[in-house]
Image (spheres, rainbow, N blue to C red):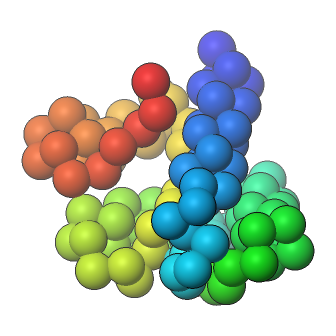
Amino acid sequence: MNKTLKTFALVSAMGLISSASFAAEKVNIGMPSWTGAQAIAHLLKEVVESRIGGEAELVPGNNATIFQAMDQGKGDIDVHPDVWLPNQESFTKKYVDGAGTVQLSS
């Protein structure tokens, strides 16, 4: 189940950042401390820059700071590269289900 959700999140994030609207904008990708998330973040950055011609920046942070930055909607962080459920369920309940300010692909 976790692998399916991770794959879904990755594909969704790649779809989101590959849209035409992001091509002209800078995308800030949150980068958690674990190696799997860092690998996905670097992959997303490479896709944005080399395939779409956009600009991307990796922004280090833990789950709390990444979700909070996405919640604020200021563009400090646009994408979380590796959401694990149920491990990060407290964040998805707060920001996705509760506030409605962060979206997971369905």
Q: Residue at x 17, y 44 (%)?
A: 100
Q: Return the x and y of residue 44 as percentages of the image width and height.
A: 75, 62
63 displayed left or right of 50:
left
Q: Is residue 38 above or below residue 50?
A: above
The quarter of the displayed image where residue 37 is located: bottom right
Name the residue nearer the viewer: 37 or 10: 10
Residue 1 visible in the shown view: yes
Q: Residue at x 22, y 72 (%)?
A: 72
Q: Is residue 58 above or below residue 93?
A: below
Can you say which quadrant of the picture contains the C terminus? top left
Q: Name, please, the residue furthest toward the left.
A: 99
Q: Name, please, the residue furthest toward the top.
A: 1
* Number of disc labels: 0
34 displayed left or right of 25:
right
Q: Return the x and y of residue 24 as percentages of the image width and height.
A: 57, 80
Q: Residue at x 66, y 56 (%)?
A: 18
Residue 60 visible in the shown view: no
Can you say which quadrant of the picture contains the N terminus? top right
Q: Residue at x 20, y 34 (%)?
A: 97
